[in-house]
Image (spheres, helix red, strand yellow):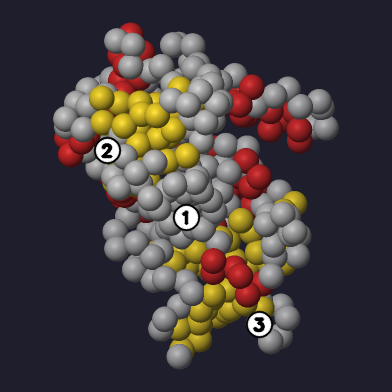
């Protein structure tokens, strides 16, 4: 197995990896981006085709180059994929794909990390892990799940509402994806929406622009040592994109409390004794960070988290984690938010490379 020395290895070629690559290129670093996907776009090609961003294009851009505008303000997924493809070409980012990183381990000299793939090992002074969450869909465990005779799928497996025409469908989850799925599926089927707590709809005139501005104010306040002014979660959960507004106006967005168990042919609430038939359950229950490649470093705390200072792993200073959520930077899991965090991550590693 061949070995190659390089200053920085970025693991993941989606939006976070591209943002890191932009600043690494600007800083004159020797680096590679290892992406396990066969084509550009990160996780976006794996979403359902009708999914839309909840920000106008100008508020969904990576650093250095705005996303081209979209006529009605909320770009579809194909527009995002085209942008990300053009972005990596524009900045001539050194992306190797498809390359699956198997492990990241400490090198024998104690000063580098080894990034092992199936064909070679990259030795790097610094590693930026930017693998996102798409490979780790979260499936909650509920009694009766194995006894349920219908179909269960996570949002990763959803493509079109047409396949559910004439069936009864239950959508589980209280976020943007769940609301967009309910809006779409309820057009063709009898749809039940269940959430663990009442969803909070944002005002109709609030979109990704406002959310980004709030995240920016919060990041600046915390960086300056001022009291936390509150973040996006304090305002609400669900952006009222046109499809969701239309579903609300026709009465399709009326959630029920979370059921207690599944039965053979549906769902059941113990406190009321009510049961409801359903043919399909769509779990829009989110994702967890895809960090299996970091297991050999033994970074997990007792609660399963990885402690970071900014983006730098506390137990492994040669490692930075980027784009997994607010714990790796405010808004870092968004297109526009990840640029700010990527800039600080790259600035933080420049001093000793």
Q: Earlier in the sequence, mark 3 or mark 2?
A: 3
Query: Residues under labels 3 and 2: Cα distance?
Result: 52 Å
Q: Residue at x 21, y 33 (%)?
A: 167
Residue 58 locus on image (x, y percent): 41, 28
- Mark toward the viewer: 2 or 1: 2
Q: Considering only vertical position in the picture, is 213 above or below 249?
A: below
Q: Earlier in the sequence, mark 3 or mark 1?
A: 3
Is 203 in front, or is 222? Answer: 203
Q: Residue at x 60, y 26 (%)?
A: 232
Q: Considering only vertical position in the picture, is 54 above or below 318?
A: above
Residue 131 locus on image (x, y percent): 49, 57
Residue 165 locus on image (x, y percent): 17, 32
- Mark 3 — residue? 107
Dot 2: within a 10 Å radius of its alpha carbon, few (fewer than 14), some, or many (20 or more) residues? some
Is 178 in front, or is 195? Answer: 195
- Mark toward the viewer: 3 or 1: 1
Q: Which of the numbered marks, if any, corresponds to residue 279? A: 2
Dot 1: within a 10 Å radius of its alpha carbon, few (fewer than 14), some, or many (20 or more) residues? some
- Mark 1 — residue? 136
- Which residue appears farthest toward the bottom when viewing the image? 1
């Amino acid at each position: 197995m061949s070995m190659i020395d390089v200053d920085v290895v970025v693991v993941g070629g989606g939006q976070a990896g591209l943002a890191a690559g932009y600043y690494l290129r600007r800083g004159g670093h020797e680096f590679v981006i290892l992406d396990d996907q066969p084509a550009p776009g990160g996780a976006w090609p794996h979403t359902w085709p009708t999914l839309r961003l909840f920000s106008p294009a100008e508020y969904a851009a990576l650093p250095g180059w705005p996303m081209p505008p979209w006529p009605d303000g909320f770009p579809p997924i194909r527009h995002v994929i085209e942008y990300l493809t053009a972005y990596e070409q524009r900045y001539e980012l050194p992306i190797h794909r498809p390359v699956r990183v198997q492990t990241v381990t400490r090198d024998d000299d104690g000063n580098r990390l080894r990034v092992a793939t199936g064909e070679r090992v990259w030795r790097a002074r610094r590693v930026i892990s930017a693998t996102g969450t798409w490979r780790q869909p979260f499936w909650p465990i509920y009694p009766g799940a194995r006894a349920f005779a219908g179909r269960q799928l996570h949002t990763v497996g959803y493509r079109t509402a047409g396949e559910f025409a004439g069936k009864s469908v239950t959508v589980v989850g209280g976020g943007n994806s769940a609301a967009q799925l309910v809006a779409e599926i309820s057009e063709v089927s009898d749809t039940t929406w269940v959430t663990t707590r009442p969803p909070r709809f944002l005002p109709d005139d609030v979109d990704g622009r406002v959310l980004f501005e709030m995240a920016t104010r919060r990041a600046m306040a915390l960086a300056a040592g001022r009291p936390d002014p509150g973040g996006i979660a304090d305002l609400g959960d669900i952006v009222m994109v046109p499809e969701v507004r239309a579903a609300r106006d026709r009465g399709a967005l009326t959630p029920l409390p979370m059921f207690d168990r599944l039965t053979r042919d549906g769902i059941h609430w113990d406190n009321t004794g009510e049961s409801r038939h359903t043919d399909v359950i769509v779990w829009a229950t989110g994702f967890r960070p895809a960090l299996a490649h970091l297991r050999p470093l033994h970074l997990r705390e007792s609660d399963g988290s990885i402690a970071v200072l900014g983006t730098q792993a506390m137990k492994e200073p040669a490692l930075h984690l980027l784009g997994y959520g607010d714990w790796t930077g405010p808004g870092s899991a968004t297109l526009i938010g990840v640029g700010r965090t990527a800039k600080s991550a790259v600035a933080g590693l420049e001093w000793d490379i």
